[in-house]
Image (cartoon, rainbow, N blue to C red):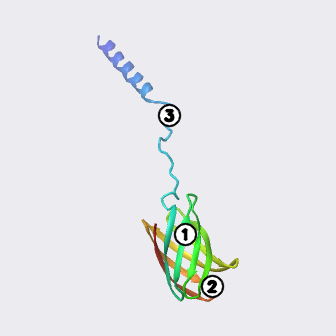
Amino acid sequence: MKKLICNSLMLLLLSTMIISCNSDDNVSNVIEQNPYEKYAGKYKGGYYGGDSGEWEVMISNQGTISGTVHSTEYNLTFQLDGEIDTNGNMDATYKYNNQKAGAFNATIKGESVTGIWTNTLSNLSGTLNGNKL
């Protein structure tokens, strides 16, 4: 009788182990999220220092940046493009008449943007800030 109970318990334990080990145990049920999605959208702000003005960008779901920079001091509008990394760091250049004029380097934290800008043509620089719209 003892042997029968012991064998029954072993059989029950073995069948429980077989049933609980499924072929999809190694497959993750987590849906992979696009790392750029949280930054996607329209942002607008200002820049200050050796020049000042406004900037506006659109960040795509693929992490690309496109937009404009408008200098209020020189009344010029530049085209801006670049990309954002998965940590919210923006790296963009702005051009005038297809010539690189400078760079915007900023970080997005939550809804806020802060960073620096440089104008290599005029040897100017300063800070920038903005928000997601």
Q: Nearer the viewer, residue 113 or 107?
A: 113
Q: Estimate how packed mark 1 is, as few (under 14), some (14 to 19) or many (20 or more) residues with alpha carbons within 10 Å.
A: many
At mark 2, the secondary structure is loop
Residue 18 to residue 88: above or below: above
Q: Which residue is mark 2?
A: 120
- Residue that label 1 marks: 57
Residue 64: name its quadrant: bottom right
Q: The residue tagged with tag 1: helix, strand or loop? A: strand
Q: Which quadrant of the structure image shows residue 76? A: bottom right
Q: Is residue 60 above or below residue 103?
A: above
User: Looking at the picture, how far across and down is residue 100, in whole percent?
Assistant: 67, 79
Label 3 neighbour load within 10 Å: few <14, some 14-19, many 20+: few
The mark lying in front, picked from 3 and 2, is 2
**Residue 72 image point, x, y percent:** 54, 85
User: Which residue type carries mark 2?
Assistant: Thr
Quadrant placement of the N terminus: top left
Q: In the image, 114: left or right of 57?
A: left
